[in-house]
Image (cartoon, helix red, strand yellow):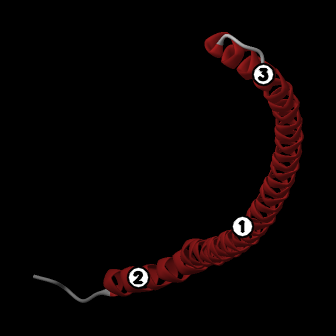
Amino acid sequence: MVTLDKTLLLQIINMIVLMFLLNRMLYKPVKQIIKERAVRLQGMRDDADGFEQRADQRQQEVDARMAEASGKAKAALDAARDEAQKAGDARLEAIREESEAMKEKKLAELKSEIEVARSSLDSGVQGFAKEMAGKILRRSL
């Protein structure tokens, strides 16, 4: 059975003093350290979120610049290709015109040669025809 005497009272006082000392020396400093760590950890998380947001923003800026540069490069390439096509078409047209002019010149030369040959043959044929007619008829015409 439990007896109530002064040792019980001493034990109660001892426990109260022990709780007070433990609270003051151990629990409060540990709670303070845990709270400071939580604050530091939250600060680090906020910093990490800020870095992540800035990284995403910079990545978007880089992507936008890359898209813009790609568009400019494509436009420049298309312009150069169109210019080259136009230059090639102009050169081809010049060659066609030159070829057509040469063809016309050669045709004119051939026609003049044909006319010369024809007139030469016509005069030769008339003489030949008279000669043949004379031989066939056995008299001179």
Marks 3 and 1 sit apart, C-alpha to C-alpha, by: 98 Å
Task: Report the residue that reaches farthest toward the front.
Answer: 139
Task: Report the residue that reaches farthest toward the left.
Answer: 1
Query: Which of the two labelled residues, at mark 2 and mark 3, occupies the earlier sequence position?
Result: 2
Marks 1 and 2 sit apart, C-alpha to C-alpha, by: 83 Å
Residue 2 at what x, y percent from top left? Answer: 16, 83
Query: Which of the two labelled residues, at mark 3 and mark 1, occupies the earlier sequence position?
Result: 1
| Element marked by disc 1 | helix
- Confirm or deny contact between disc 2 and disc 3 (CB under 8 A): no
Between 43 and 137, the one nearer to me in the picture? 137
Reading the image, the residue beneath label 2 is 10
Between 131 and 45, the one nearer to me in the picture? 131
* Callout 1 amino acid: Ala
Marks 2 and 3 sit apart, C-alpha to C-alpha, by: 179 Å
- Per the rendering, the mark at residue 141 is 3
From the viewer's perspective, is the residue at label 1 or at label 2 nearer? 1
- Relative to 131, is 55 above or below? below
The crowding category of the residue bearing disc 2, from other C-alpha atoms within 10 Å (few below 14, some 14 to 19, many at least 20), is few
- Relative to 73, is 132 above or below? above
- Confirm or deny contact between disc 3 and disc 1 (CB under 8 A): no
- Per the rendering, the mark at residue 106 is none
The crowding category of the residue bearing disc 3, from other C-alpha atoms within 10 Å (few below 14, some 14 to 19, many at least 20), is few
Residue 49 at what x, y percent from top left? Answer: 64, 74
* Callout 2 amino acid: Leu
Query: Which of the two labelled residues, at mark 1 and mark 2, occupies the earlier sequence position?
Result: 2
Residue 65 at what x, y percent from top left? Answer: 79, 68
Reading the image, the residue beneath label 1 is 67
Quick check: 118 left or right of 32? right
